[in-house]
Amino acid sequence: MENGNKSMNTPTNVTIKGILGTLMASIDEDKKKNLISLGMGDPTAYSCFTTNTVVQDSVVQTLESQRFNGYSPTVGLPQTRKAIAEYLSINLPYKLSEDDVFITAGCTQAIEVAVSILAKPNANILVPKPGFPIYELCAAFRNVEIRHYDLLPNKGWEVDLAAVDALTDHNTVAIVVINPGNPCGNVYSYQHLKKIAETAKRHKILVVADEVYGHLAFGENPFVPMGVFGSMVPVLTLGSLSKRWLVPGWRLGWFVTTDPNGIFKNAKTVERLKKYFDICGGPATFIQAAVPRILEDTKEVFFTRTLCTLKQTSDICFKKIKEIPCFTCPQKPQGAMAVMVKLNVSLLKDIIDDIDFCFKLAKEETVILLPGLTVGLKNWVRITFAAEPSSLEEALDRVKSFYQRHSRQQNGLN
Ligand SMILES: *Cc1c(COP(=O)(O)O)cnc(C)c1O
């Protein structure tokens, strides 16, 4: 096991934004108008993923009121904290209070807060593989050791609980669970989440529940928030408006102590948290002020429409993947906005690995997919299906012809 107590780890790992930028730069200027990117998880690039007017009007209203041009309390506006506490409590067996909620600049800052608050000498945190690279990046800056547990592709990307047992020691402080999942599109059952909670309880560690895709579940399993097990094990719930309300650029997120027994949330931790928030500088006050109305007035039909579109595009994606022999998809996506496919490079005559595949694909077909290596799995590829159906079909048709040209079997032209 790596020793986390060595000198500052330099964050050298490839980031999603970093590699997508390099992929983009490799495409010839004159071809860029044909570009289809299924690499990034920003659905707002496509007009079928537009937020609704209530959400926009709420912000216009708070801005025009001129009442929210000042600083907010560093932990967030009280009405915003209260509204998020109420919103999250709907799906919990107990009620959160506004003191449980801290407003952050998107879920990204909530991750940063979680890692920083949990950091202490020799501490390690368990994160999923494949996963979301921001956790590694934050941990590297805070000198926290990261240990990867596997998600099991043939079991619906469930957590390998035996691996969690093997990785945990007395320096382990938390396990990160991303559900609904990015990059795999998994949605965990109540039973599986309960097992994760029991495992965390047994090891006396916290659960960091990244629920930035909360409620974006369109398959068999309904979305169950980890906080349901908050009485069993303290949960830090991280979320944002970004994905469900389709406003990732607004940078409005939350860090929530879902811990009704106050195991994590004692007076000392709360004091530390408050101090930490003094240096955070959260989202703009007028956006915070719009949150109560956004949460209250967004019509169910808006959410239903998004889910319908995601179901449709994930179906297209899954069907098209099956037509590409060098791809296998172990699990049909059930939620979130992306899916992982295994790349069989042995079927290709001149492709070394996932990175090589994605660069050649970008150059030849002006289609961008994310190399699996960036999320921890070499020779896999992440495909974002939050795209216009026609663009998605076109992009995957181009991947198919790319396969045909590079296949060992044929010399293309069929
Ligand atoms: C998008 C995403 C985030 C970041 O959310 P923001 O609100 O845009 O900062 C965090 N975790 C996961 C798993 C994500 O996919």
Image (cartoon, helix red, strand yellow):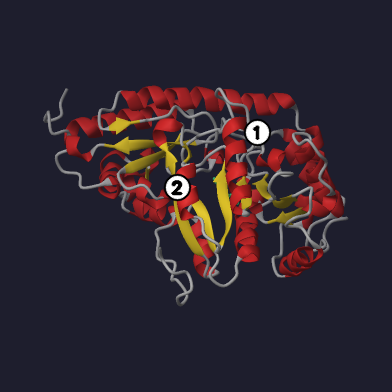
Query: Would residue 372 be found to the left or right of residue 189 on screen?
Result: left
Question: Where residue 115 sits in the image (x, y, percent)?
Answer: 60, 61
Determine which quarter of the picture holds residue 25.
bottom left
Q: Residues within 10 Å of mark 1 (few under 14, many from 20)?
A: many
* Residue designated by label 1: 224
Q: What mark, if any, has residue 40 been given in the picture?
A: none
Whole-percent x, y for residue 403 in the image: 23, 33
User: Quarter holding the N terminus?
Assistant: bottom left
Report if the CB atoms under discs 2 and 1 are less than 8 Å apart: no
Q: Earlier in the sequence, mark 2 or mark 1?
A: 2
| Secondary element at tag 1 | loop
Judging depth in this view, the residue of 340 and 292 nearest the camera is 340
The furthest residue to the bottom: 7
Residue at (69, 66) in percent of width and height? 280
Which residue was labeled with disc 2?
A: 163
Q: Is residue 353 visible?
A: yes
Horizontal and vertical percent for residue 176?
56, 50
Q: In which quadrant of the rendered view does residue 228 lie? A: top right
